[in-house]
Amino acid sequence: MAAILSEDEQYRAFVTRIKEKIPFEPGNYEYVSARVRAKKAALYPADTYPRLLQMEIPQIARFLGEGGYKEEVLALGARLRGVDLIERATADNLAKVFTRIIEISEGRLRIMVAMYLDRWDVANIKTILRAKVYGASAAEVEEDLVAAGSLDASFLHALLEKETVDEVFKALEGTIYGEARRQMGDSFDPAKDRASYEDALAHIYYRHLLDSIQPRTEPSRLFNEFVRREIDILNIKTLLRVWRAKASFAHDVFLDGGLELKTDDLREMSALDLPALVARLSSYSFYEEIATALKEIEAKGVAHVERTLEKFHLKAASRYSHIHPLSVLPVLDFLARKTREVENIRIIARGKEHGIGTDAIKELLVI
């Protein structure tokens, strides 16, 4: 005779059956979303950048030291000056803020945010490799490193201290990025084939990221769509550069996994003339956002379209984060906007250091 369950046991059995049928991902979405909304509100508003454009480099550093970058500017101010101070302070702040978001996240949310931020591993490896290939010192490139991925600051510093490129590759063997070097084969020359290695790093990063996302739940589905839309945007940028340069490559420069754009179509479009290229792109959902910029591509260049795409990506991230406030999307929206804030600050500082005019610098900003 079947055992008679108590009400408490019946309830627990019922909950177990529900969990088995309805996918569930643990994560403190409400708490982290509230925290990133507060952080987003503290980002510099759009009218800050015209003010920064009117400042000299020491004034910009002082301005940063009076706001959200105060801790980093004070810590570095005794040994760094000018653009070096601005770049190192913004990099350190970015790493601190992003690491803190991982720390306060729990469950699957934490895993998703951490894996997304591994893109900084790719950027840092590229920076270190370029330094070794061109003979730059560790001090010259250190301000460009952002320890916000799985490879922490001590590991990155150890890579910088390696004497040769081969030693860097050997140190990376214990990570997923060791695969990139193996793909290059025995005849790989970092000085000549660096671009193919860097593309391999991007392929590996996005492949591992998408493989880790099983869109069985709403948070994972939204995360999957966000990443695939980002791949589309990166592929359009690559398409336009390849099209403009009339270039061909022995390796695949387009990323797999986009939401709309397939790699075969991208390769085909790269050989079209401008009217045919625009006609093909007009069938995609993002076309209206870049239509005007595409018409101006001959006069203003590919970079103008790229900035338009970046603005579209920021707007889309913000829109979807409002539609799904208790998901991973508000976090991704903040990560993108914080990164863009740092990039805008650096563009202004570098532009002023090189004597570029205010109007020209302004054109490079994504606001």
Image (cartoon, grey):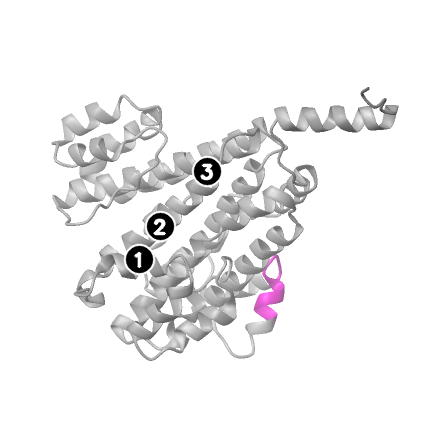
Marks 2/1 in contact by CB < 8 Å: the verdict is: yes
Secondary structure category for the residue under label 1 = helix
Neighbourhood count class around disc 3 (C-alpha, 10 Å): few under 14, some 14–19, many 20 upward = some
Task: Please indicate whether residue 31 sits to the left or right of residue 129 in the image.
Answer: right
Residue occupying the point 52% across, 41% down: 332
Residue sitting at 40 percent across and 62 percent down? 124
Tell me if 131 is positioned left or right of 270 in this view: right
Q: Amino acid at mark 3?
A: Leu
Above or below, comparing residue 30 to residue 102 in the picture:
above
**Cα separation between marks 2 and 3:** 24 Å
Which residues fall within the magenta stretch?
66-74
User: Label 3's element?
Assistant: helix
Q: Are marks 1 and 3 in contact (CB under 8 Å)?
A: no
Residue 310 in the image: state x and y as whole percent. 39, 40
Rendered view: 188 above or below 329: below
Residue under circle 3?
Answer: 314
Residue 180 badge: 1
